[in-house]
Image: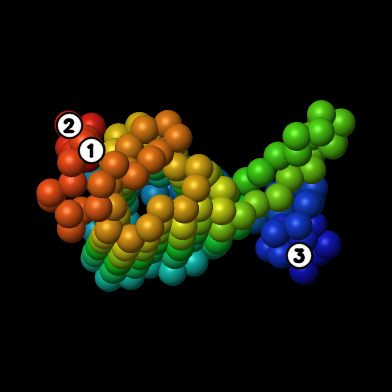
């Protein structure tokens, strides 16, 4: 493994303009193009392409095309998960999605981090932090999950929310930045918006 790929996988600053990483990107390009062009193909054929593209895919996973990612091989998706149209999963660090997760249209899971220093950013330096989505999570349409975020099991995130920090299990979170408005096992919370109107597949 080359130095830049090794540094990328270790979560360190690396330069993506690298022949080894370019080859991995080309592999992703070919497989994503095949997957997105075969929306009407037999489910077994689509599942075969997805299994080749991603690092791990559980049983009965459905990903509606178009779907885009950085590498694919650093994404794992648990059984029974559904990903709606237009998902963008940038996996320069691992993206781990649990079982029976519902992901609405145009959701973005973004692991890369660019330099704040303009000179280093212009030189191309970047790094990435992993994203983890627990079992039974629902991400509404257009949700953006930022680098390094973990979302606990059974949590619901309202449409259009930008998740910049970890969310605990079993809560409803909405807004930009996303904030917890109530626990989902606490229907008697006072003064907290249920946020149900903000949800969408």
Report the Cα–Cα distance between label 3 and label 2.
44 Å
Report the Cα–Cα distance between label 2 and label 1.
13 Å
Describe the element under mark 1 as helix, strand or loop: loop
As drawn, which residue projects farthest toward the front? 190
Q: Nearer the viewer, mark 3 or mark 1?
A: 1
Counting residues from the start of the chain, the first of labels 3 and 2 encountered is 3
> Who's the residue at 50% across and 42% down the image?
164
* Residue 84 position in % (x across, y down): 29, 44
* Residue 13 position in % (x across, y down): 78, 52
Residue 126 visible (yes or no)? yes
Report the Cα–Cα distance between label 3 and label 1.
46 Å
| Contact (Cβ within 8 Å) of mark 3 with mark 1 | no
Q: Indicate whether 8 appears above or below 124.
A: below
Labelled disc at residue 59 = none
Residue count near mark 3 (Cα–Cα under 10 Å), binned few <14, some 14–19, many ≥20 = few
Labelled disc at residue 192 = 1
Residue tagged 3: 6
Describe the element under mark 3 as helix, strand or loop: helix
Q: Indicate whether 173 appears above or below 7.
A: above
Q: Answer with left or right where residue 196 lies relative to residue 111.
A: left
Which residue occupies the foreground of this view, 134 or 110?
134
Describe the element under mark 2 as helix, strand or loop: helix
| Contact (Cβ within 8 Å) of mark 3 with mark 2 | no
> Who's the residue at 27% across and 58% down the image?
170
Counting residues from the start of the chain, the first of labels 2 and 1 encountered is 1
As drawn, which residue projects farthest toward the left? 188
Residue tagged 2: 197
Which residue occupies the foreground of this view, 70 or 12?
12
> Who's the residue at 66% across and 43% down the image?
113
* Residue 181 position in % (x across, y down): 29, 42
Q: Nearer the viewer, mark 3 or mark 2?
A: 2
Counting residues from the start of the chain, the first of labels 3 and 1 encountered is 3
């Amino acid at each position: 493994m080359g130095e830049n790929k090794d540094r990328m996988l270790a979560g360190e600053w690396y330069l993506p303009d690298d022949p080894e990483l370019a080859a991995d990107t080309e592999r992703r390009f070919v497989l994503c193009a095949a997957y997105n062009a075969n929306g009407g193909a037999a489910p077994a054929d689509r599942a075969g392409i997805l299994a080749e593209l991603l690092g791990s895919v559980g049983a009965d996973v459905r990903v509606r095309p178009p779907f885009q990612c950085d590498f694919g091989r650093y994404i794992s998706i648990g059984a029974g998960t559904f990903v709606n149209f237009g998902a963008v999963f940038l996996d320069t660090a691992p993206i781990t999605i649990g079982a029976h997760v519902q992901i609405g249209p145009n959701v973005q899971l973004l692991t890369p981090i660019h330099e704040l220093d303009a000179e280093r950013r212009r030189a191309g330096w970047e790094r990435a932090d992993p994203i983890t989505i627990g079992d039974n999570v629902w991400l509404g349409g257009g949700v953006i999950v930022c680098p390094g975020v973990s979302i606990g099991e059974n949590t619901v995130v309202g449409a259009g929310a930008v998740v910049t920090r970890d969310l605990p299990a079993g809560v409803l979170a909405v807004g930009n930045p996303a904030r917890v408005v109530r626990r989902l096992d606490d229907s008697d919370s006072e003064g907290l918006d249920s946020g149900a109107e903000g949800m969408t597949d």
